[in-house]
Amino acid sequence: MPTNTPRRVSLTQALHDHLDRANRGQGHAYPQTDGETKFACDMEDSPYGCPWCDAVEWPDGNPLDVA
């Protein structure tokens, strides 16, 4: 029986995956009030969440998360 348990990947691999998605423009940049721009990557059908995007304190939650 399948479960919804995310698979584990190394942080190094997760960062490379995040940066690859960012380089391909898979996601959205969100300007912040302090002048910084934060990027949320689009995980598409990835079986694990993005630890880099999940660590950002989005005011209304990660804008690309599917609830």
Image (cartoon, grey):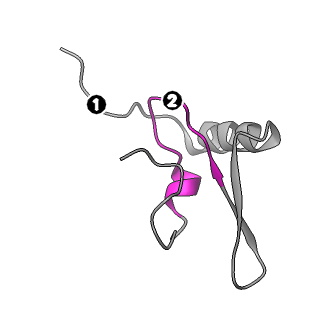
Earlier in the chain: of badge 2 and badge 1, it is: 1
Residue 51: in magenta span: yes
Locate residue 10, reporting x and y percent.
54, 38
Locate residue 22, reporting x and y percent.
75, 44
Q: What amino acid type should be assigned to the residue bearing mark 2?
A: Ser
The residue shown at (69%, 52%) is 28
Residue 67: in magenta span: no
- Residue at numbered disc 1: 4
Q: Nearer the viewer, residue 33 or 51?
A: 33
Q: Secondary structure at mark 1?
A: loop
Q: Residue furthest left?
A: 1
Q: What amino acid type should be assigned to the residue bearing mark 1?
A: Asn
The residue shown at (24%, 25%) is 3
Q: Quadrant of residue 14?
A: top right
The numbered mark at residue 46 is: 2
Q: Secondary structure at mark 2?
A: loop
Locate residue 61, reporting x and y percent.
45, 63
Pointers 2 and 1 in contact (C-beta within 8 Å): no
Q: Quadrant of residue 66?
A: top left
- Rate crowding at label 1 as few (under 14), some (14 to 19) or many (20 or more) other CA atoms within 10 Å: few
The residue shown at (57%, 45%) is 11
- Rate crowding at label 2 as few (under 14), some (14 to 19) or many (20 or more) other CA atoms within 10 Å: few
Magenta span: chief secondary structure: loop
The numbered mark at residue 14 is: none
Image quarter where the N terminus lies is: top left
The residues colored magenta run 40-55
Question: Disc 2 to disc 1, how far (Cα)?
Answer: 12 Å
